[in-house]
């Protein structure tokens, strides 16, 4: 019997994001909201553990009210309960403030053996929340799990590093972050997702978590965003015709300036 | 903080990456009028670090700290930082570095910006401005840290090492920070199951389609891939119909989806099935001798040329880049 | 051949029964004879003739099996038994008749013309001695025993189809070919709040009794497998073997509660995924088995389990998130129409025709060209049409074929609402899959509009003179009948009429055309994922097209266009046999005035 908490994040489908040239802002209108892929892998792994060892899975997400959709999908995939942490005060949180809210929820839930999350989120690729949360809750952390198994009260994880795989072991409770190689997440049918609305979803705000405004949002962040600049966005479609010997150096130079090309 | 923080510290598991970080640290340290400090583990060539720009090297002499483990390193570094109070800490963004930096930052309650794309000091030389890409590459956010040390993780290839200066002198200090035993145990290390880089992880991909006429010509593509440090991929017909490459090497709707920094499409017409696989590439360069090829609607650099001429020209151009 | 056999046997069966009733029941009971006079005489000739008919049929059948055996026609013990026993029954029947006539010498013997010949033969050979009466009795019992054995064997051999096939035909569903079954009604499910619906088939009892009856009807003729494109491509799927496997489960299963799932041990999921839902199998089946129905039911179960490979997952996820199978932004849906002056329904609520572009026509550069051609045609003919633009969302037909019924139904409910909102009366589409779904599957969800495929509409425009075509189009043209347009919906002639108005020569017909057309390989969702094939379905079809010596392979479906063009490139024949949609061919010939 293993009690598992799965951290999930609802993000905008990044490939669909567009830039409004006139206002120089990101257009999110009409862009579908999806669960960050690695989080689906995390949940799938949790469901497999539950299928093998029994237990309970709670899916947790921090986000706007729309994030409830993500939790429905999680419940349809096999989570037993869901927690939506939502509050306008959470907006503008950096990784530290986000982890702070999650830590409060985790502590509130109290009974858990394992926390699983994706190694990174698809919109930010920051890799921060997992380790920060582990630090706050004083949990061992094992990251980049490409395989994992449970034996009694220990977890054995195969970490996927650049040039090797490390097999690492720790006692529960602990936090594990997964990479996409670990499994193929199951796909619930639409009917299953609709049916999942019946499973329990808690909705907690800052007050429920006993968090004050000074530790949330911008105030609670350790990093400040000074400014945002919109990059070009759309494909540039720069046309180059003519002698290959003349074009190639121009291309190489532009690509180097863009930071995507370096001679090896 | 009662004392002022000073010093630009760098650390990475990979010595090559440490040298790159030192290159930037040197510049920052000079602007700030402070020292560049490298943290080294037992057995590392400390003189090499000094010759590449470190004013001081903190040598972790404890054998137990020889290889990276997140608990011991977090403890040790936290203690060092509390004692020495650096201004800036740059950590190499290896996978381990990325799990280490945030935990360390949380331990000492400071901010950290991961996958930094640019580091500059502000005009008044008070803050480190750290850039990173977000929102699918549509936005560049410039961050500052509200606390010290100001932390950032930096990937390899962003900065260049300084040329080595054999006459450079510096200080080597043996340090023995305290740390608790680790909470995880390394059981064994294994080789990775898949040879080489997985397409979905590759940062640079050189891909080809039916524009390549003979199987032997693949060698040309492979050479170009080596020159730019990329991985070879192909379009579906090459793998499925011609079977020149295995099926896990084709990019497309029913194949691999990739998100490299650079995707080079050589002789690929740009059918919809292929395009859906490469949408998330940061920069797409398409080479095709048909000016009407559909791929040109979806790429950043549209090169209308014969790929057999372009590939050697590009290899030369890239090699010239390396010399510049 | 079959007609000869069964008509012969039926007549003889009735005949023999009549004789039995007459001599053993009617005469003793009523002292009256049925078989008298001319009735009796014609009766005798009739029986003799049909005995010959049955014999002829059996001999043809045997010759066919031995000398010109079609592929995939298994010959089992069953077949040997049936042939032998029927031939022996018929032969002994004639022998018995011959002996009787030879001994009794009735004046009307020549009416039993065959028996009479046998009698004459026996007499001429001097075989009619005292021993023959005894021999006759033994032979009679032998003949009777064989006949009863044959009857008794019916439930144990393929002869069972004598009962199951007509029953199956009686109880087969009456849905139009293009409409799949609905395991639930999403509107009712949502209203009731009860999602406890059984979807799909995994154990044998999950199939309806009618489906199971149909499995029992299979006579192993192999026609379905011979027509199947997935079989021709060397995939794991063989429709006949699939049905036989399911029948075998029924025969060997001992429990009444359904037992275990037939997948993956008996039916390999890859067999099911390889089906393109082209319905060539159903079309061929003489006993009306609906293989596609059974396959989709099993797919529904697999989808319910959710363990799919990445491309199938992506397809369904894309349909859910982006309302198109490519996963491209909905905001890009009208990009193909830039600069064409096309209005959306929202901009122009007064219109005659809603042109449904479809996902391929909206996003795939190859088929965007077809969409533009259609716009050119509509504008040249001065038709008041609109498109839905960015309001257009995939009808998720592929999801239904794959087995994700909920996704399909939700899309159907939404689109019917949207069509109602704009008061849509007529929908024009270039995609046979969209055409089929709107026409045959949407009425169940409240749709009430006419659906036209672009071939129908363009033909109409040409016939009524609304389109002026320049003469002198070049090319020898062959036409590939899309499965969902032709075999599914009987639309064969419109595209051919269009071709006739373009070039003087008639359409070159491929070996397999019209109802017997061979699939391009994209249907059933196959376009979106990988199927292990030894030789691609599209390549097989393209070779068939090349055999016609045509220079243009005309299509009327965006997926056929895609698959066949792919095949033309793989064959290095992109220039020698170009793949063009008929709309493109017509648009090229529109004169400027």
Image (cartoon, coloured by chain):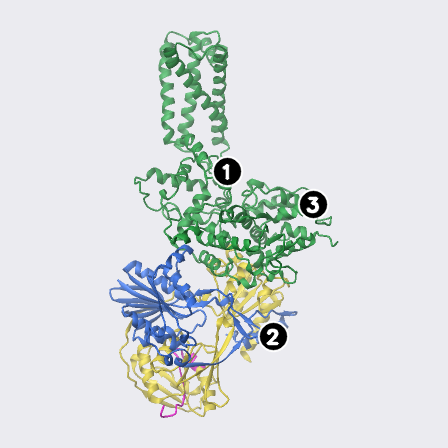
Query: Quick check: can you spot residue A83?
Result: yes
Q: Are marks 3 and 1 on the same chain?
A: yes
Mark in the foreground, 3 or 2? 3
The answer to if B14 sits in the magenta stretch is: yes
Chain B: its colour in the image is yellow
Mark 2, residue position = A250
Gap between marks 2 and 1 measured at Cα: 62 Å
Residue A253 falls in image quadrant: bottom right
For residue C312, above or below residue B133: above
Determine which of the numbered discs, if any, sits on residue C284 in the image: 1
For residue A125, above or below residue C494: below
The disc numbered 3 marks a residue on which chain? C
Query: Judging from the image, what secondary structure is the residue with disc 2 in?
Result: helix
Chain A: its colour in the image is blue
In the rendered image, the quadrant that contains the C terminus of chain C is: bottom right
- Bounds of the magenta segment: B1-20
Residue at 50%, 25% in the rendered image: C4
Chain C: its colour in the image is green
Mark 3, residue position = C464
Query: Judging from the image, what secondary structure is the residue with disc 1 in?
Result: helix
- Point out residue B93 in the picture as x, y percentages from the top left corner: 42, 76
- Point out residue A35 in the picture as x, y percentages from the top left corner: 42, 65
The answer to if C356 sits in the magenta stretch is: no
């Amino acid at each position: 019997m293993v009690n598992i908490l799965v951290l999930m994040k609802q993000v905008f489908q990044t490939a669909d994001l567009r830039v409004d040239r006139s206002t120089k802002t990101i257009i999110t209108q009409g862009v579908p909201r999806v669960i960050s892929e690695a989080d689906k892998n995390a949940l799938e792994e949790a469901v497999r553990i539950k299928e093998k060892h029994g237990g309970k899975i709670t899916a947790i997400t921090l986000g706007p009210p729309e994030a409830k959709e993500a939790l429905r999908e999680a419940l349809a995939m096999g989570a037993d309960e869901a927690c939506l942490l939502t509050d306008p005060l959470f907006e503008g949180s950096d990784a530290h403030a986000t982890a702070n809210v999650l830590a409060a929820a985790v502590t509130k839930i109290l009974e858990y053996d394992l926390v699983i999350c994706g190694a990174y989120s698809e919109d930010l690729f920051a890799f921060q929340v997992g380790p920060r949360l582990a630090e706050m809750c004083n949990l061992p952390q094992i990251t980049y799990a490409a395989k994992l198994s449970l034996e009694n009260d220990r977890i054995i994880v195969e970490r996927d590093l650049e040039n090797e795989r490390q097999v690492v072991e720790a006692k529960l409770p602990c936090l594990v972050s997964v990479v996409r190689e670990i499994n193929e997440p199951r796909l619930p049918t639409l009917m299953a997702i609709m049916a999942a609305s019946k499973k329990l979803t808690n909705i907690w705000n800052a007050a429920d978590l006993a968090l004050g405004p000074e530790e949330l949002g911008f105030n609670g962040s350790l990093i400040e965003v000074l400014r945002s600049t919109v990059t070009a966005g759309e494909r540039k479609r720069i046309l180059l015709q003519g002698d290959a010997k003349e074009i190639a150096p121009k291309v190489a130079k532009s690509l180097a300036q863009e930071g995507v090309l370096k001679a090896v | 903080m009662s004392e002022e923080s000073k010093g630009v510290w760098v650390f990475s598991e990979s010595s090559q990456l440490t040298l790159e970080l030192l290159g930037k640290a040197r510049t920052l340290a000079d602007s700030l009028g402070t020292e560049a400090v490298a943290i080294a583990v037992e057995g590392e060539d400390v003189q090499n670090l000094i010759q590449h720009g470190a004013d001081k090297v903190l040598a972790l002499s404890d054998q137990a700290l020889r290889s990276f483990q997140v608990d011991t390193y977090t403890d040790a570094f936290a203690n060092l930082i509390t004692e020495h109070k650096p201004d800036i800490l740059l950590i190499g963004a290896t996978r381990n570095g990325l799990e280490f930096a945030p935990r360390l930052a949380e331990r000492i309650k400071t901010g950290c910006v991961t996958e930094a794309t640019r580091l500059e000091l502000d005009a008044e030389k008070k803050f480190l401005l750290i850039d990173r890409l977000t929102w699918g590459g549509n936005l560049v956010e410039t961050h500052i840290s509200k606390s010290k040390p100001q932390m950032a993780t930096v990937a390899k290839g962003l900065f260049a090492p300084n040329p080595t200066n054999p006459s450079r002198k510096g200080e080597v200090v043996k340090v023995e920070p305290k740390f608790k035993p680790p909470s995880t145990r390394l059981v064994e290390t294994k080789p990775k199951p898949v040879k080489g880089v997985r397409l979905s992880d590759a940062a640079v991909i050189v891909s080809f389609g039916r524009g390549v006429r003979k199987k032997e010509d693949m060698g040309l593509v492979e050479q170009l891939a080596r020159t730019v440090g990329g991985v070879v991929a192909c379009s579906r017909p090459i793998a499925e119909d011609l079977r020149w490459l295995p099926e896990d090497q084709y990019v497309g709707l029913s194949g691999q989806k990739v998100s490299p920094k650079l995707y080079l499409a050589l002789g690929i017409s740009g059918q919809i099935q292929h395009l859906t696989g490469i949408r998330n590439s940061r920069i797409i360069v398409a080479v095709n001798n048909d000016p009407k090829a559909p791929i040109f609607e979806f790429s950043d650099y549209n090169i209308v040329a014969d790929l057999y001429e372009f590939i050697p020209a590009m290899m030369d151009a890239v090699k010239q880049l390396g010399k510049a | 051949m079959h007609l000869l056999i069964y008509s012969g046997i039926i007549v003889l069966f009735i005949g023999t029964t009549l004789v039995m009733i007459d001599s053993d029941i009617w005469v003793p009971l009523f002292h009256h004879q049925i078989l008298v006079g001319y009735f009796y005489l014609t009766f005798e000739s009739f029986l003799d003739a049909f005995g010959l008919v049955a014999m002829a049929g059996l001999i043809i059948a045997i010759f066919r099996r031995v000398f010109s055996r079609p592929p995939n026609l298994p010959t089992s013990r069953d077949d040997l038994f049936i042939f032998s026993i029927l031939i022996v029954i018929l032969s002994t029947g004639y022998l018995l008749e011959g002996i009787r006539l030879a001994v009794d010498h009735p004046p009307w013997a020549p009416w039993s013309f065959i028996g009479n010949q046998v009698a004459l033969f026996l007499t001429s050979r001097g075989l009619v001695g005292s021993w023959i009466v005894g021999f006759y009795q033994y032979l009679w019992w032998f003949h009777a025993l064989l006949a009863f054995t044959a009857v008794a064997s019916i439930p144990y051999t393929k002869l069972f189809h004598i009962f199951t096939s007509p029953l199956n035909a009686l109880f087969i569903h009456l849905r139009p070919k293009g409409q799949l079954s609905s395991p639930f009604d999403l509107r009712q499910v949502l209203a009731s709040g009860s999602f406890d619906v059984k979807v799909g088939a995994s154990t044998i009892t999950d199939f309806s009794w009618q489906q199971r009856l149909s499995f029992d009807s299979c006579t192993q003729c192999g026609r379905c497998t011979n027509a199947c494109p997935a079989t021709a491509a060397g995939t794991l799927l063989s429709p006949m073997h699939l049905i036989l496997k399911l029948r075998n489960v029924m025969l060997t299963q001992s429990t009444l509660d359904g037992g275990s799932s037939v997948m993956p041990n008996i039916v390999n999921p890859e067999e099911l995924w390889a089906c393109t839902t082209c319905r060539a199998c159903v079309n061929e089946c003489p006993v009306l088995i609906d293989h596609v129905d059974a396959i989709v039911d099993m797919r529904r179960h697999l989808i319910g389990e959710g363990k799919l490979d990445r491309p199938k997952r992506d397809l369904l996820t894309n349909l859910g998130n982006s309302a198109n199978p490519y996963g491209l932004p909905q905001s890009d849906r009208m990009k193909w129409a830039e600069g064409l002056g096309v209005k959306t329904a929202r901009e122009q609520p007064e219109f005659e025709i809603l042109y449904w572009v479809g996902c391929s026509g909206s996003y795939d550069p190859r088929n965007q060209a077809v969409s533009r051609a259609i716009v050119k045609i509509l504008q040249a003919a001065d038709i008041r049409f609109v498109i839905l633009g960015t309001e257009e969302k995939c009808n998720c037909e592929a999801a239904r074929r794959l087995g994700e019924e909920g996704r399909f139904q939700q899309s159907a409910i939404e689109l019917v609402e949207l069509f109602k909102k704009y008061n849509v009366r007529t929908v024009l589409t270039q995609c046979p899959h969209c055409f089929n779904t709107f026409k045959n599957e949407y009425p169940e969800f409240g749709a009430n509009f006419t659906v036209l495929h672009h071939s129908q509409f363009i033909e109409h425009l040409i016939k009524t003179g609304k389109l002026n075509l320049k003469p002198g189009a070049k090319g020898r043209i062959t036409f590939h009948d899309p499965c969902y347009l032709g075999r599914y919906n009987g639309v064969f002639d419109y595209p051919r009429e269009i071709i006739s108005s373009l070039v003087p020569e008639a359409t070159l017909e491929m070996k397999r055309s019209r109802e017997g057309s061979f699939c391009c390989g994209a249907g059933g969702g196959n376009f979106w994922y990988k199927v292990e094939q030894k030789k691609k379905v599209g390549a097989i079809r393209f070779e068939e097209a090349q055999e016609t010596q045509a220079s243009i392979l005309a299509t009327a479906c965006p997926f056929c266009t895609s698959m066949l063009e792919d095949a033309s490139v793989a064959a290095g024949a992109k220039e020698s046999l170009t793949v063009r949609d008929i709309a493109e061919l017509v648009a090229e010939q529109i004169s400027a005035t």
